[in-house]
Image: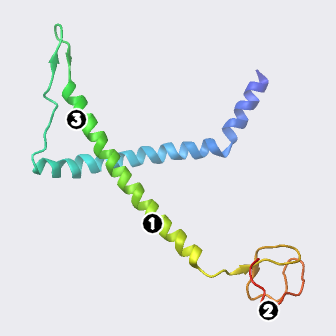
Amino acid sequence: MKSFMKEFKEFISRGNVMDMAVGIIIGGAFTAIVTSLVEDVINPILGCFGGVDFSNIVIPLVGEASLKIGNFINAIINFLIMAFILFSIIKAMNHAADKLKKEEEDAPPTTKMCPYCKSEDVPIEATRCPHCTSQLDAGQQAG
């Protein structure tokens, strides 16, 4: 039992658990934003173009019981709208991230590698390596 508790403590203290917890909290907040976007912005716009509400579709069963199939159809439609919106947001964010990454790749290098100690963070203008103090050629480029 002690080893189980020790393993559990190690599991909880790992950074991954904290990252997951933060992700779940942020996801919950983001869900509220997307839900509001769908219910308060998108659905009213769709309603202007003859939006349909399926919540009145009910299949009666025995006695008071009934299948509210219309609510299920509305939930599916809302899910598809949310999925499309999330897809669009993520696609736009990925596109922006790719542009930033490409700009960083196209930028000229600001450091070079020392041919002696192989340190990669030597400033381009340096004539001596700050790590091993070796004399560097003025024309030496990143390796």
Q: Residues within 10 Å of mark 3 (few under 14, many from 20)?
A: some
Q: Residue at image x 22%, y 51%?
A: 42
Mark 3 secondary-structure assignment:
helix
Report how far apart the C-alphas of labels 3 and 2 lie in the structure.
69 Å
What is the x, y in percent for residue 38?
26, 48
Which residue is farthest bottom?
138
What is the x, y in percent for residue 129?
84, 82
Can you tell which quarter of the image residue 134 is in? bottom right
Amino acid bearing label 3:
Asn
Q: Between 124 and 27, which is closer to the camera in this rendering?
A: 124
Disc 3 marks which residue?
A: 74
Foreground mark, 3 or 2, reads 2
Quadrant of the drawing holding the N terminus: top right
Q: Residues within 10 Å of mark 2 (few under 14, many from 20)?
A: few
Q: Residues within 10 Å of mark 1 (few under 14, many from 20)?
A: few
Mark 2 secondary-structure assignment:
loop
Amino acid bearing label 2:
Ala
Q: Between 109 and 9, which is closer to the camera in this rendering?
A: 109
Mark 1 secondary-structure assignment:
helix
Mark 1 near mark 3, Cβ–Cβ under 8 Å?
no
Q: Residue at image x 22%, y 52%?
A: 41
Q: Residue at image x 75%, y 83%?
A: 141
